[in-house]
Image: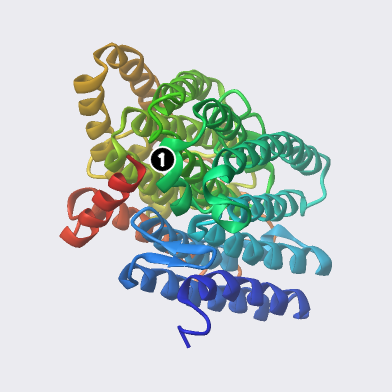
Amino acid sequence: MADFFPLPWLIVFLPWAGAVVLALLAPGGRWPPLVNCGVSAASAALALGLLAAPEGVQGWTRVDGVNQPLVALGGIIGLATALFSAATVEAERFDGLRARAYHAAFQIFMGAQFLALLSDNLGVMWVAIEIATLASVLMVAVHGTPAAIEAAWKFFVLCGVGIALALFGTILLYLAAQPLVGHGDPGLSWAALRLVADRCDPGILSLAFVFLMVGYGTKAGLVPLHGWLPDAEAEGPLPISAVLSGLLLNAALVAVLRAKAIVGINPGALEPGPLLLGFGLASLLLASLALWRRRDARRLFAWSSIEHMGLSAIAFGLGAHVAGMLHLMGHSLVKSAVFFGIGAAAQLKGSQKISDIGGLAGSHPALGWGLALGIAGLAGLPPFSLFVSEFRLVTAAAAAQPWLLLPLGLGLLLAGAALVRVMQSLCLGPATPDAPVAGAFARPGGLWWASGPVWALLALSVLLGFALPAWFAALLGDAARLLG
């Protein structure tokens, strides 16, 4: 079957087939959440199977060290999100049409972000990221409240500007390569572009990277076009925050890195590293200050996503690609766990304001301690993988750009202190009274269905940081070679 339907395309089309089934299923009852979990489990198995697939290009797709770990990560987070969604969806109180739209849009998003990561064709990558964005906008708006509609419109408008800029940058890359590779698909192939990049017009390549950096940087949540992210993650359904922070941002940043690998080959073109450093530093410093002024828990952790995407951009800008890959993956695992914990707490307390959530470790130990450990992980504390990636990043900065240690250290210190402060308030302070949302955790197993994904993702983060298998480390080394 692999000869007729390669594994990368199977990974993409299975969620889309699931979306069709979920759109046709009668809403309500147990079947839509169960089917959503089943499709996500099958997708996760296929995504993990990609780790054993040989590298190479098949049509519009490619398998390499850059996308293999990120696709596997996407499958794991997609399954965890589907399980968490099954535990919490009744309390979202969707009507029939909204329930169908929510489940179908989730699977459309999953297939699109897989395609964005797996694509060798930069045009197909652009289309995939646009599909993922539109599906995300639908999920953010699905409640139909004024706040949700406003957040969805801001998401749509800002990311629409970004995707238009990214399209222009993609066209410029094609024009730069056209005299060397001719018309058609080769002019958009990442592999083909890398082979001829050193002979392309450096001015066109430089302009293309600027447009791609700003355009895809918008979707990656980098300052200055980051304003959609806190609203989208605060107003959408609870499980959606995990896939926005854990998956959409990664796919957008990978698009930037693919462009960086092309432009960086040409000695006469703009050096991509300083531009990534600038966007990363701006994101880190602004987010580290904003974390001290948030009162809404989900909005606060959305700002934490901006901070960590900034750190990833700094790592890639310095050429510390292994640290950058580790940071992307570690952030996705830990941030998804934290959003699951906050989502469960919001349904228990009837509010997502920080002042209304407190003492979770005492009142709900499995949930509270999982959330506390997750926030500690986001603050860069051991034993989680973000501690390892941030240590690698600081080491790389000290070796390559010592001046960077001051703003980098300041941003890390401010953000870490703000997160520890919030962790103490949410998890270790006096317990606030429960006021459960109607329908919260009504299914058998109750809160354990929401707490289980938290602990599973945290355990994977610890393994990623301190028990990395040799073959996986070699895979990350291959990614560094391709991106360098």
- Mark 1 falls on what kind of element? helix
The vertical placement of 87 against 201, above or below, is below
User: Left of 222 or right of it: where is 69?
Assistant: left
Residue occupying image coordinates x 53% and y 50%: 181
Q: Residues within 10 Å of mark 1 (few under 14, many from 20)?
A: some
The picture quadrant where one finds residue 411 is: top left
Judging from the image, the colouring scheme is: rainbow
User: Left of 136 or right of it: where is 143?
Assistant: right
Q: Tell which of 302 and 136 is nearer to you.
A: 136
Report if residue 430 is visible in the image: no
Residue occupying image coordinates x 74% and y 75%: 28
Q: Return the residue at label 1.
A: 261
The picture quadrant where one finds residue 451 is: bottom left
Residue occupying image coordinates x 54% and y 78%: 38
Percent position (x, y) of residue 95? Answer: 81, 65
Q: Tell which of 393 and 177 is nearer to you.
A: 177
The vertical placement of 476 against 269, above or below, is below
User: Left of 96 or right of it: where is 484?
Assistant: left
Percent position (x, y) of residue 52? Answer: 31, 72
